[in-house]
Image: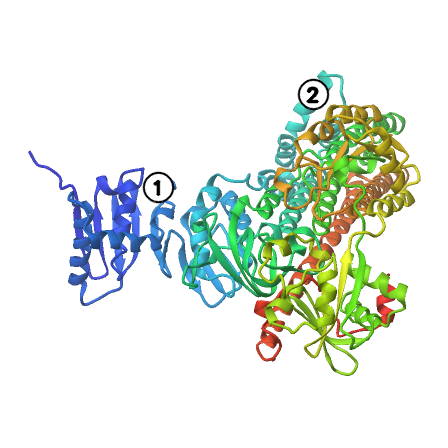
C-alpha cells in the first residue's frame, strides 16, 4: 500500500513551494499563523502566498546565489516550530521579536477560493500588497476588494477615520486603493497595520451603499426606449415590455394600497405606466425613471462624501503614540497597545490621541474641534485633555484614561450619521405629503381625460415628482445642521430633535441648569507701580479678539467702563502660557497665565507678591509652585493673567464669577426672538426659594417642592411643546427626558457618553441655547422654502399640461428643474460649511508649525515649559481699539 507524503517541498532559486493539507487546509488558521511567524523570521523572505483550496503555499524571496543557505534557515525555523520539546530561551526571545511583525493581526478568514498573499510593509506583515510608495502616497491592492462595492465603501469610511489620511480613491475593478497621507502624522507601515486590523469591520461592518441595479436598469431601458421609439421601430414592443416589467413593483404596491382603500404614489406611478402602455411611447417614462433614480443616488453620494469631511475631526483616530518610559525615553507604539495608566508624550503641532490627565508640561491646546470653544486653552498638570484636540504650542505628558472608541470623541463620532439619517420626522412628512398629493393629481388627470379626451395633458398632470426633492431636502438639511451645530458645540444625540425643535416654545429649566451661575468680571487690577492700572488692563484687553470667550468680554467691558486705553498691537503670536505681541514702540508684551510665570522663573515684584497673598482670586505661582492640584481645580477662565513688558512684570488681572446672571441674558435673548415663548422653572427647592431664584432671572412660572416624578408630571401637563433643560447625565433626569418633546443637557463634554438627552451643549453655561434655537428655526425655514420651490415647479408643469400643451416629458423636466435647484442649494450650503471647517483647521495647523519654527529661532522663554489661558482666534497683524469696540 502506497502512502502520500504529509508535506511535499519543491525549492527554487526565488522561492520554495510547499504542499500540505495539514498546514494550509486548516480553516482555523492557527497552523498558518505559526508557519508565517517562523518563515518571516528569515529576513530574506519577501512574500508568502497561500491557496487553501489546493493546500498550497509558496515562500518567495529575492533571487539569490545563496538560495541553499536560505533553505537551510527556513528548514531550521520550521523544524523548531514543530519540535515537541520546551522552547529554549533564544526561541522565546525570537517569539518576542516576532510580535512586531503583527502576525496575530493578519486577516486570514476570507473566502477559501481567494489566495492569501502576505507581504512585508516596512517592519510589519500585511495581506495588503504595496504596489507604489513615495513620501506621502501609497497604492495598495487586495483580492478581497474585487467587485465588492460594499467592502470599498467600508474601506473609505475606515480611511476617513485615520488621522493623517488626506485623500483616497478606491477601484473595485483593479482591487486597489490609492492613498495620500501627511508624513508628519502617518507612514505606510502604520497605515497598513491599521487597515489590517480593520478587516473584520470591512467585511461585516456598516451597511454598504445602496444597490445600483435599478439605476443601471433604468439607464439601459432609456437607451432601448430611445432606439425603439426614434431609431428602430421594431424594438419598440421590446422597450414597452421592459418598461412595464420595470414598473411592475409599483403596480403590485398600488394594488395592495387599493385593497386597504388607500391611494398613494404607487397608484400614481401605475397610472403613468398605464398611459405609457396605451400610447406605446416608452421614452418619456424611462426619462422619468432615470431621473427618479439619479437624484437619490446623487444625494446619497453627497451625504457620504460630506459627512466624511464634515465629521472627520471627530472621527479621526491616531494610529500611534509616544509612551514615556521610566527613564524618560519616548517610544512610539501602536495606539491599541496603550493601557489605562500609561503615560504618553504629545508635542506641539500634534493631535492628542487619548482622553487623559496632564501629569507634566504646559501647552496651549485647541479644543474647538471637539467642543466648539474658540481659541486655545492652557493645559497644566492636573488638567483633563481629550482625544482629537490639538496642541498649538508646548509639550505635555498625559496619563491615559481612555483610548479609541471609548474616548469622548470616539463616542461622538459613533453617533454621527454616515449616509442616510434614519427616523427623521421630516422624511416621514415628505412621504405623507407626497402620497397625499397622489389623490388630487389622479383626480385632476381623470377629469381632464374625460373632459378633453386627450391623453397628453393628463399624462403631464401626473408626471411631476412630488417625493424626490422633499426626501433629499430632509436628509441634506439635517446633515448640514447637525454639522453646523456640532462645530458650535451642540451635539444632536437624536437627529430627529432637529425637526421637533422648531415646534417647541416652552423652556422648562431644571435645578441642574445652575440658573444662578454668574458671568465673569474683572476682580482686581494689581500693578507693580511701573505703569497705571488702566494701562495694565488695556495691555491685557488688547491680546484678545473682543468676543472670543467669557474672559475676553469681561476685559473689554471693564476697559470701556474705566476708559482704559487699548493699544494697537502687531506681530501677535500664540505661545503655551502666553500671548506675545509688540506695541507701537516695538516693545515685547506678554499676557501670561500663572504657570508661565512659574515655569519661566520670572521675578515677582514685592508689591504684586503681597497683593496676591491677600487676594482671594489669585494663585501665586511663587509660593504655591508645587500645588498643581489647587491650580487644576481653579476654573480655567478664572485663572489670573500676568502682564509683562520686555520680561518685566507690569501687573496682574484677576477674575471672579460675580457679574450678571448668565441665565437672565440668555432668557432675555430668547424672549426677544419669540414673543410667545414660555419659561418655566421646576425645582426640588421649597416653593418660596424656587420663586426667588426664578424672579432674579426673569421667570414667572415656578413649580417647587418636586421630586423627579413630579417634574415629569409637570412636563406632561404642559403639553407637547416643551424643551426640558437640565443635566442629562443624571439618573434622576430620565423621567423628565422621556416626558419632554425635546430634552437639552447642559452637562458638558466630560459626561457626554453618559448623557441621555436628545441634545447636549458641549460648552459650559446656557449661552448656546440661543444658537440652538437659531439652528432649529433655520432648519424649518429651509424645509419650507424647499417645498415652495418644489410645488412652484410642479404646478408649473401641471399648468403647462393643461394650457400650454406640455406632454409628460416637458412636465417631468420642469419638475426636475425644481429638484435640481433644491439639490444645488443644499450642496452649496454643505460645501460652504465644510470649507469653513477645513480652512479653519488648516490655518490652525499652519500657524502652529510656523510659530514652532519661529520659536526655535527666537530667544523667548522656553515655550515648551509654559502654559496659556489667553485664547487665540485669528492671526491678526494689527488690532486697534476701534475694531475691538466694533466687536462688542
Q: Foreground mark, 1 or 2? A: 1
Question: Split into 4 quadrants, where in the image is the N terminus?
Answer: top left
Question: Split into 4 quadrants, where in the image is the C terminus?
Answer: bottom right
The answer for how far apart the CA atoms under marks 1 and 2 are is 45 Å
Residue at the right extreme of this rendering: 675
Q: Is residue 583 left or right of residue 358?
A: right
Which residue carries the number 2 mark? 255
Using the rendered image of the protein, determine whether residue 871 is visible from the camera's viewpoint: no
Using the rendered image of the protein, determine whether residue 153 is visible from the camera's viewpoint: yes
Instruction: Kindly identify which numbered label has been placed on residue 645.
Output: none
Which residue carries the number 1 mark? 113
Q: Is residue 61 left or right of residue 859?
A: left
Q: Secondary structure at mark 2?
A: helix
* Residue at the spot 79% in from the left edge and 67% down from the top edge: 541
Above or below: residue 301 compared with residue 374 = above
Residue at the bottom extreme of this rendering: 585
* Residue at the spot 85% in from the left edge and 66% down from the top edge: 559
Residue at the left extreme of this rendering: 1
- State the image coordinates of residue 655 (x, y, percent, origin top left): 77, 58
Amino acid at each position: 500500500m502506497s502512502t502520500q507524503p504529509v508535506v511535499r517541498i519543491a525549492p527554487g532559486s526565488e522561492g520554495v513551494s510547499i504542499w500540505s493539507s495539514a498546514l494550509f487546509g486548516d480553516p482555523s488558521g492557527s497552523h498558518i499563523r505559526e508557519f508565517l511567524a517562523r518563515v518571516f523570521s528569515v529576513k530574506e523572505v519577501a512574500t508568502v502566498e497561500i491557496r487553501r483550496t489546493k493546500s498550497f503555499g509558496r515562500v518567495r524571496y529575492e533571487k539569490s546565489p545563496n538560495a541553499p543557505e536560505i533553505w537551510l534557515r527556513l528548514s531550521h525555523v520550521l523544524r523548531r516550530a514543530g519540535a515537541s520539546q520546551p522552547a529554549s530561551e533564544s526561541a522565546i526571545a525570537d517569539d518576542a521579536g516576532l510580535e512586531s511583525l503583527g502576525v496575530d493581526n493578519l486577516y486570514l478568514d476570507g473566502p477559501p477560493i481567494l489566495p492569501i498573499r502576505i507581504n512585508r510593509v516596512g517592519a510589519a506583515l500585511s495581506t495588503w500588497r504595496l504596489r507604489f510608495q513615495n513620501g506621502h502616497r501609497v497604492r495598495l491592492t487586495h483580492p478581497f476588494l474585487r467587485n465588492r462595492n460594499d467592502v470599498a465603501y467600508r474601506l473609505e469610511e475606515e480611511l476617513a477615520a485615520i488621522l493623517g489620511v488626506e485623500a483616497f480613491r478606491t477601484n473595485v475593478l483593479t482591487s486597489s486603493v490609492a492613498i495620500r497621507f501627511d508624513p508628519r502624522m502617518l507612514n505606510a507601515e502604520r497605515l497598513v497595520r491599521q487597515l489590517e486590523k480593520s478587516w473584520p469591520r470591512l467585511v461585516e461592518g456598516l451597511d454598504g451603499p445602496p444597490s445600483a441595479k435599478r439605476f443601471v436598469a433604468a439607464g439601459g431601458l432609456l437607451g432601448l426606449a430611445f432606439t425603439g421609439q426614434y431609431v428602430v421601430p421594431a424594438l419598440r414592443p421590446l422597450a414597452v415590455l421592459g418598461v412595464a416589467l420595470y414598473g411592475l413593483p409599483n403596480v403590485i404596491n398600488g394594488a395592495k394600497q387599493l385593497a386597504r382603500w388607500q391611494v398613494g404614489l404607487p397608484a400614481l406611478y401605475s397610472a403613468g405606466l398605464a398611459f405609457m402602455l396605451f400610447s406605446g411611447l416608452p421614452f418619456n417614462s424611462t426619462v422619468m425613471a432615470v431621473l427618479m433614480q439619479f437624484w437619490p443616488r446623487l444625494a446619497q453620494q453627497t451625504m457620504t462624501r460630506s459627512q466624511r469631511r464634515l465629521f472627520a475631526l471627530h472621527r479621526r483616530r491616531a494610529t500611534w503614540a509616544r509612551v514615556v518610559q521610566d527613564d524618560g525615553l519616548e517610544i512610539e507604539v501602536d495606539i491599541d497597545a496603550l493601557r489605562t495608566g500609561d503615560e504618553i508624550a504629545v508635542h506641539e503641532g500634534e493631535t492628542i490621541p487619548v482622553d487623559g490627565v496632564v501629569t507634566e508640561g504646559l501647552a496651549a491646546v485647541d479644543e474647538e474641534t471637539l467642543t466648539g470653544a474658540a481659541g486655545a486653552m492652557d493645559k497644566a498638570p492636573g488638567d483633563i485633555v481629550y482625544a482629537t484636540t490639538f496642541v498649538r504650542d508646548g509639550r505635555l505628558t498625559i496619563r491615559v484614561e481612555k483610548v479609541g472608541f471609548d474616548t469622548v470623541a470616539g463616542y461622538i463620532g459613533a453617533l454621527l450619521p454616515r449616509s442616510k439619517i434614519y427616523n427623521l420626522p421630516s422624511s416621514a412628512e415628505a412621504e405623507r405629503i407626497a402620497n397625499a398629493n397622489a389623490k388630487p393629481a389622479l383626480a385632476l388627470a381623470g377629469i381632464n381625460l374625460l373632459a378633453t379626451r386627450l391623453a397628453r395633458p393628463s399624462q403631464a398632470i401626473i408626471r411631476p415628482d412630488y417625493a424626490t426633492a422633499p426626501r433629499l431636502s430632509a436628509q441634506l438639511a439635517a446633515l448640514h445642521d447637525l454639522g453646523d451645530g456640532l462645530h458650535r458645540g451642540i451635539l444632536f444625540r437624536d437627529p430627529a430633535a432637529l425637526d421637533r425643535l422648531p415646534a417647541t416654545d416652552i423652556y422648562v429649566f431644571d435645578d441642574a441648569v445652575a440658573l444662578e451661575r454668574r458671568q465673569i468680571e474683572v476682580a482686581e487690577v494689581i500693578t507693580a507701580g511701573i505703569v497705571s492700572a488702566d494701562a495694565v488692563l488695556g495691555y491685557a484687553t488688547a491680546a484678545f479678539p473682543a468676543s472670543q470667550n467669557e474672559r475676553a468680554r469681561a476685559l473689554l467691558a471693564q476697559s470701556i467702563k474705566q476708559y482704559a486705553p487699548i493699544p494697537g498691537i502687531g506681530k501677535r503670536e500664540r505661545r503655551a502660557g502666553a500671548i506675545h505681541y509688540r506695541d507701537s514702540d516695538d516693545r515685547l508684551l506678554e499676557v501670561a497665565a500663572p504657570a508661565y510665570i512659574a515655569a519661566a522663573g520670572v521675578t515677582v515684584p514685592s508689591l504684586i507678591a503681597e497683593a496676591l497673598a491677600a487676594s482671594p482670586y489669585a494663585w501665586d505661582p511663587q509660593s504655591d509652585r508645587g500645588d498643581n492640584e489647587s491650580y487644576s481645580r481653579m476654573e480655567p477662565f478664572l485663572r489670573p493673567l500676568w502682564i509683562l513688558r520686555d520680561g518685566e512684570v507690569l501687573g496682574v488681572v484677576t477674575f471672579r464669577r460675580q457679574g450678571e446672571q448668565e441665565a437672565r441674558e440668555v432668557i432675555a435673548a430668547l424672549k426677544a426672538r419669540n414673543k410667545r415663548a414660555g419659561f418655566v422653572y421646576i425645582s426640588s427647592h421649597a416653593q418660596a426659594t424656587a420663586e426667588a431664584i426664578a424672579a432674579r432671572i426673569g421667570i414667572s412660572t415656578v413649580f417647587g417642592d418636586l421630586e423627579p416624578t413630579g417634574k415629569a408630571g409637570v412636563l406632561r401637563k404642559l403639553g407637547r411643546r416643551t424643551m426640558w433643560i437640565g443635566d442629562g447625565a443624571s439618573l434622576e433626569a430620565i423621567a423628565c427626558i422621556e416626558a419632554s418633546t425635546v430634552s437639552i443637557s447642559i452637562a458638558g463634554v466630560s459626561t457626554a457618553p453618559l448623557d441621555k438627552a436628545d441634545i447636549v451643549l458641549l460648552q459650559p453655561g446656557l449661552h448656546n441655547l440661543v444658537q440652538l434655537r437659531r439652528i432649529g428655526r433655520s432648519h424649518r425655514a429651509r424645509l419650507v422654502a424647499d417645498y415652495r420651490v418644489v410645488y412652484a415647479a410642479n404646478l408649473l408643469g401641471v399648468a403647462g399640461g393643461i394650457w400650454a400643451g406640455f406632454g409628460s416629458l416637458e412636465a417631468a423636466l420642469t419638475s426636475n428643474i425644481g429638484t435640481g435647484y433644491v439639490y444645488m442649494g443644499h450642496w452649496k450650503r454643505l460645501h460652504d460649511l465644510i470649507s469653513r471647517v477645513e480652512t479653519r483647521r488648516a490655518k490652525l495647523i499652519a500657524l502652529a508649525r510656523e510659530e514652532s519654527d519661529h520659536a526655535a529661532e527666537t530667544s523667548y522663554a522656553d515655550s515648551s515649559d509654559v502654559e496659556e489661558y489667553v485664547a487665540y482666534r485669528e492671526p491678526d497683524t494689527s488690532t486697534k481699539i476701534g475694531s475691538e469696540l466694533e466687536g462688542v
